[in-house]
Structure formats: C-alpha cells, structure tokens
Amino acid sequence: MTDSYSYQSNAVPPQRAPALPAGDYEFFWGAATAAYQIEGAAREDRKGPSIWDEFCGIPGNTLDGDTGEMACDHYHRWRADVELMRELSLRAYRFSVSWPRVMPRGRGPVNPTGLDFYDRLVDTLLRAGIEPFVTLYHWDLPAALQSELNGWLNPDMPAIFADYAAVVVERLGDRVAHWMTLNEPWVVATAGYFEGVHPPGLRDRAAGYRAGHNLLRAHAYAVAGYRASRCGTGQISFALNSSFSFPASDSPEDAAAAQRAVENFAGWFGDPCWFGDYPAVMRERLGDLLPAFSAEDAALLRRSMDFIALNYYTSDIVRHAAGAGPMDAEVVTPPDFRRTEMNWPIMPDGFRELLCWLSRRYGGLPVYVTENGAACPDQPDEHGYVDDQDRIAYLRSHLSAVGAAMAAGVNVRGYFVWSLMDNLEWCEGFSKRFGIVRCEPGTLRRIIKSSGRWYAKLIQSARRGAVALAAGAVP
Ligand code: FCB
C-alpha cells in the first residue's frame, strides 16, 4: 500500500507552532450537516418538493433507492439532536436551511412553519452554548424553480436567491453571525451539469459553466443584500470545496500542471469571490465556455467573502499530459493509495498545502474548515456501538495538518467534522457513513461512536483557544 509520496513542500517549512495565548480568540469546534441529508419530513408542514426529492424518487438514481423522505428524521428529533451536540461538547454547529421548506415554490409566499423550525433550532442551539453557522443553499433547489425557470441556467436566479436569502436573514440574522450562501457550487456545476449524476442530470460542459456563473452571481447578490440589511453585521462567505494537486515529479512541467489544476479547482469559485473574476488560466484555456461577468457583477463579487469556508476531503497527484482536459493535467494518484470508503485518497498533507495556498491567495482571510471527515466501513457491535479507530486516525491526521497550517501562519478559526451523524450521502444513499454518531438504520437511534467520544475529549482539552491544535498536540 502506498501511503506516502515524494513531494516536499517549500511553502510550509516544518516548524513548531508559536504558542498562542490561551483564549486569545474563540476557536469554533463543531460538526456539520445539511437539510436534505438529515431532516426528512419531506412533505410535511407545507414544505415544497426540491430537485433532490424528485431525483431520489426516480428508481436507479440512488443506491438501493434511498431517499431523504425520512433521512435521520431530524425535523422531529432536533431537540434530542441538540442535546447530543451538547454531549459531544460542540461549540458550533453548521446546518443548512431547506429553501423549499421556507419558500415552497422558491419564490413568492413564505411558509411560516418552515421558518419557525429554524428559528427554534437557532434559539435552542444558543441556549446550549452552541454557535449556529448557517448555509442557505445545500443543493435542495425548490423543484418549481427547476421546472418553471430551468434552475441555475436562468440568469434571473441570482435575484430570486437573494430574495430568499433576505427572508432567512431577516428572521435569523439577529442571532446568527456566520453565514454561507452556497455549499460547494463546484459540485453543483460538475456533478449536476458536467457528469449528470446529481440533479438536474445534464451532461453539458457549457451549461455547467453557465450554471456555475449564475451560482457565483447568486452568491454575490445575496452577500450584497446581507451586508445592506439591518442584520448584516456578521460574516458571510460560501463553502468552497477543493483538493490540492501535488506534482508527480520534480519536473517544471508537472509543477505547472499541478498549479493549473489547483487554480482550476479552488480558483473557479474562489477567485471571483475575491478578485471579481475567474483565474487567468481558466480564461485562457476555456475560452468561450466561460461566461464573462458584467462590470456590476464583478464589483459585487469582489471581496464577497469575509472568510474562507473550506470543505476538504482528499487531494491528488497530477502530471502534465497534453490533451488531458483543458488544463493538460492528468491525475496519476496510484490506485493502491490508502483511501476511505468513498475511494477518496487520504492525503492530510494536501489539506495543509491547500490551507496555505488559499490563505496566501485570498489575503490571509480567516479560515473555517466547514467540512472534513471520512466514510468508513463501520461495524457496530451487538449494542450498536461503533469503535471507528480508522475515522479517528483520519481526523487526527487532518487536524494535525490544520495545526501545521496554523503554525505556518494560516488564520484558522474553526473546524467542523462532517458529519454530526450518519446520513443520506446523496446518490450513495445510506451506504456511506460519515457520522461521529451512528444513526441506526430502522430505529434511527443515535449512538455516539468512538470518534465522537474522542472528538468530545479533544474539544474539552482545547477549549480555551486552539493551543493544542496549533502545537500539533492532537491526542
Ligand atoms: C460534500 C457535501 C456534503 C457531504 C460530503 C461527504 O461534498 O457538501 O453534503 O455529502 O461531501
């Protein structure tokens, strides 16, 4: 098994962490979820259907026909779930608001019962000492916006999204200080429009870049609305997912290919939200496939992130290969590289490198790791208890990488495990488990795994600031 590679970083010299004064700032230790993956109650209390409800309803689209109809039934069990978070010593919780629960048709009438649900959740979290981090769009587009307007391909979507965002901000903004507009627009564009494996199921690259473009504009409109609103005193960004690409050799060609790959991945959505335009390498190599921003949109996009929200799982090794996609970069990660159940290579070094890369590129902004975790082949014992040492090893090595990035000067302010509990992993259904808490199939009973207990201890020991983490002293 290959579990190391020859790449040596110049960017981050191996150095010990400077001691951070304890309690210097609050480090948000948390866990993350998303509405469609945990809530269930897909048709309750006047919630409208989302594109994911419809997609999962079509046989063959998800493994074993699994759907989010019931999911973890969090919509009914949310009080107990907040208790669970308290038991885990969480300081923060990242969740998403279901757009069709709040606006059943995506625009027009608001469903007060839907808004009430999130309102109560926020209050209960705050009473439990848990800081809410809210994502406005984690992929569950109201189905009516897809059927009536062609979803993200419609240039009017940014204004429609901003209206929805304003409704949620108006209701929760007095208590929520950390917002994310979109979750992983990269995945929406690539899985939904390049590969057709997520709704709306297109296989059309030009459409994917147009959808990505409108997602960026939607983010910018919502951010502008937020900042102008009476509650807009908090921080707002979007959750960016990326891997880091290591060059396969010392050759300058491979180094350049790896650099292009990172710019094309992280920079596709990161650059516009900081610089107001796509990376030059994308413009040069994608030509007309990449739409242009109007001057007004570019101005709205520039500096439209107050922090970097990074979702990190894996990285790759690439070499220069003419014709291997627009970046002439081919992934050559060995097939026997250690991987998680998702078949994603386990590369904590890529995490450190990416954190440093993003921090350098985007002005040293504060960083929140808004997702990181692993799907593992959990084997519950007769009591339903899961001793997931593999997940602990993954989390430990990735937290050490965060510590190394902090030691190199990256301003990391929080870390959210994906996920609080086992849930509906999109097309993979319930077969892939990321939770630090088991959600027992059938009974939906919550049982804290070894990783959950380990994480709680870590949080307790690092409570005052992130000293242990920065020093690389993750037990
Ligand atoms: C991310 C998604 C999240 C979850 C993890 C495993 O891409 O944001 O919902 O499915 O992957």
Image (cartoon, helix red, strand yellow):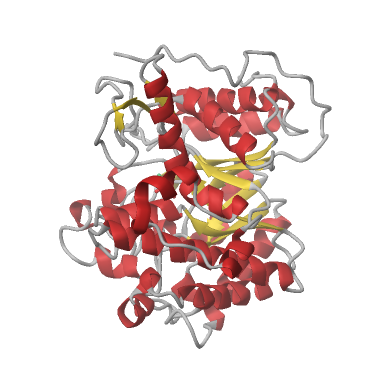
Residue 231: quarter of image? bottom right
Vertical comparison of 150 with 196: above or below: below
Q: Nearer the viewer, residue 41 or 115?
A: 115
Q: Position of residue 68 (x, y in %)?
A: 34, 61
Q: Nearer the viewer, residue 446 or 313?
A: 313
Q: Residue at x 71, y 39 (%)?
A: 27
Q: Relative to residue 397, is residue 51 drawn left or right?
A: left
Q: Residue at x 50, y 78 (%)?
A: 160
Residue 171: quarter of image? bottom right
Q: Position of residue 456 (x, y in %)?
A: 61, 34
**Quadrant into which the C terminus falls:** top right
Residue 224: quarter of image? bottom right
Q: Nearer the viewer, residue 127 or 228?
A: 228
Vertical comparison of 246 with 87: above or below: above
Can the viewer see residue 461?
Answer: yes
Q: Relative to residue 392, is residue 14 drawn left or right?
A: right
Q: Relative to residue 17, is residue 436 drawn left or right?
A: left
Can the viewer see residue 420?
Answer: no
Q: Position of residue 466 (x, y in %)?
A: 72, 30
Q: Position of residue 420 (x, y in %)?
A: 50, 45
